Amino acid sequence: MNGLASTALALWREDLRDFGGYRSARSDALCGEVWLNANESPTASAADAGGVLRRYPDPQPHPLRDALAGLYGVAASQLLATRGSDEGIDLLLRAFCAPGQGAIVIAPPVFGMYAVCAKLHGARVVEIPACDTAVGWHSDLDAMAEAALRERATLVFVCNPGNPTGEAIANGEIEHLAQRLRGKSLVVVDAAYGEFAGADDGIRPLAENDNLVVLRTLSKAHALAGARIGSVIAAAQLIDMLKRCQAPYPLAQPAVQAALAALAPEALARTRDAVGQVRRERERLHALLADAPGVRRVYPSQGNFLLARFADAQAAFDVLLGAGVVVRDMRATPGLDDALRISIGTPAQNDRVLAALACLAEAA
Ligand SMILES: *Cc1c(COP(=O)(O)O)cnc(C)c1O
């Protein structure tokens, strides 16, 4: 894919062909001692003892971009740091869907931001519902490919591992989808929960497929949801295009500092331990929940959450809330009108979930 991002070039919005984006005070590589080119304050804020916040931040700080690229095993030129992966989704919509004309393909039930960004941008949302099978949820990638070709959708979103389904899709299937859509659509693999999956190697197929885009985030496994740091990983040419669509200074300085600290070796080791505990707790909670009275079904999950169906989801939600435990009510989602999504907590928190649901059995 090096240099040969033919799909991105073919799909880049016609009306943006010559669009360079905003030229900020940080765009030109100038050297100087007295910086008077960005209307910044000459003195520091009382709230900013170190004086580091007086200046506009670097749009793509090299140390951060290098650290993220190292983490995901790609070249820095293949990675754009974003304000959470939510911004990555929005940038893809803006760059590759003509407003009021474009279309995307999704497989609900799925993360809501794809449809939200599409609606805000006036893009059509083509839904190919995932199948609820005996072994868990299954996205029909063949049907998604057909829909993309038929509807001329430029973006196909594949959430892997799936939120809220917990589904894991094999790399081979995603590669096959990308090959089928080469030159026609970008396949966007949202790997927000990749670290919790059995094998976190979703980046590998990028090398041979210029229409594959991978989204990663520090919000989940790296425990930095509040810092809002995500990554778009794709062919370098596509990354350059997205950068032109991005806000001038997307990454706040304190967020960059927090991300860099979280990517230091000792912090990464701690993250690996924490992810290991979540995975072990996921399997423990899965087994105990599946046997709990009032629970109809618990789906296998490769994420840091479990999706479960209940005989009386309202009663389950209420009994959990009564015990001080807030879970995600999924009942407004088509096909999930008896379901709750429970994030994996600490062992003590998970025990609290189980204890509360045991009360439900007594009440019934
Ligand atoms: C949580 C989540 C995100 C959001 O990530 P941010 O980096 O916090 O914006 C993206 N995709 C999926 C599937 C998620 O569940």
Image: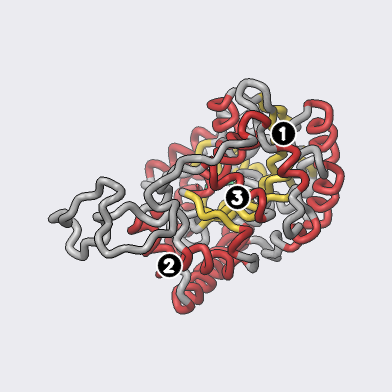
Taking 293 as reference, is 90 above or below it? above
How far across and how far down the image is residue 248, in percent? 43, 45
Q: Is mark 2 within 8 Å of ligand 1?
A: no
Label 3's element? helix
> In the picture, residue 9 is in which quadrant?
top right
Question: Disc 1 designates what residue?
Answer: 105
Which residue type carries mark 1?
Val
**Mark 1 nearby-residue class (10 Å; few <14, some 14–19, many ≥20):** many
Question: Disc 3 designates what residue?
Answer: 240
- In-image side of 295 versus 360 (left or right): right
Which residue type carries mark 2?
Leu
Quadrant in which the N terminus is drawn? bottom right
Question: Disc 2 designates what residue?
Answer: 260
Label 1's element? strand
Q: Nearer the viewer, residue 324 or 194?
A: 194
**Residue 100 visible in the shown view:** yes
